[in-house]
Amino acid sequence: MATPLGWSQGGSGSVCLAFDQLRDVIESQEELIHQLRNVMILQDENFVSKEEFQAVEKKLMEEKAAHAKTKVLLAKEEEKLQFALGEVEVLSKQLEKEKLAFEKALSSVKSKVLQESSKKDQLITKCNEIESHIIKQEDVLNDKENEIKELQQVISQQKQIFRNHMSDFRIQKQQENYMAQVLDQKHRKSSGTQQAQSQRLREK
């Protein structure tokens, strides 16, 4: 099918890119939840305090809630994209049919103009009306393209918010690892002191 006026071949590629971005956000959030679970397991192995464990558990629940909200939002945005894409497809087919009909009508008009000069003005008016209708349809297609671009911007903003969450999580994870190391060193030092005291008692 010929490319409609005002509609570029890159439209489908933009929609595919939008779907890829949706999938990337969901996969990234699932990976974040998996990492939080691993942090909880690691803290348990390193004798992390109950308060710290509860803080991480709370953070996990918050991330799960944020993940669920994001999935709902992305599902809505994807639905809007699908709807807009469907409308564009319908309008594109309609415009293509009208273009073919216009070309056929124009060819017929040209022939009739040569044969019936008395009807010239009436036929030209009809052609102008058809052209005006096609221009209006192209304007509708342009509006739909702008709507798709706006939806893609919303998806990009959601991805940026998620990247910020990931950055905060990495910082927290580094802090938690440091606290775990300090607790482990204190535990070893305490064990060593107890062994030394026991050894002195035996010598006495």
Image: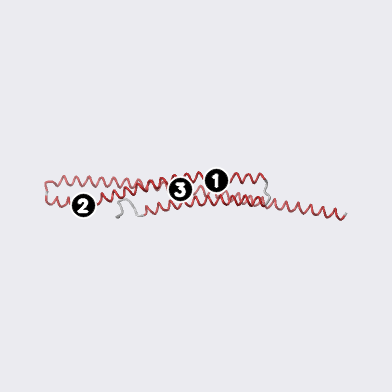
Q: What is the number of the mark on residue 64?
A: 1
Marks 1/3 in contact by CB < 8 Å: the verdict is no
Q: Is residue 78 left or right of residue 104?
A: right
Q: CA distance from mark 2 to mark 1?
A: 59 Å
Q: Secondary structure at mark 3?
A: helix
Q: CA distance from mark 2 to mark 3?
A: 43 Å
Q: What is the number of the mark on residue 155?
A: 3
Q: Is residue 204 left or right of residue 188?
A: right
Marks 2/3 in contact by CB < 8 Å: the verdict is no
Q: Is residue 148 left or right of residue 96?
A: right
- The residue positioned 85% from the left and 54% from the top of the image is 202
Question: Which x, y percent locates residue 58?
Answer: 60, 44
Q: Which residue is mark 2?
A: 104
The front one of 8 and 20 is 20
Q: Nearer the observer, disc 2 or disc 3?
A: 2
Q: Secondary structure at mark 1?
A: helix
Specify few, some or many for label 3: CA neighbours under 10 Å numbering under 14, 14-19, or 20 or more.
many
- The residue positioned 73% from the left and 51% from the top of the image is 187
Specify few, some or many for label 1: CA neighbours under 10 Å numbering under 14, 14-19, or 20 or more.
some
Give the amino acid type for the residue marked by disc 3 in the picture: Ile
Question: Which x, y percent locates residue 127?
Answer: 20, 47
Give the amino acid type for the residue marked by disc 1 in the picture: Lys
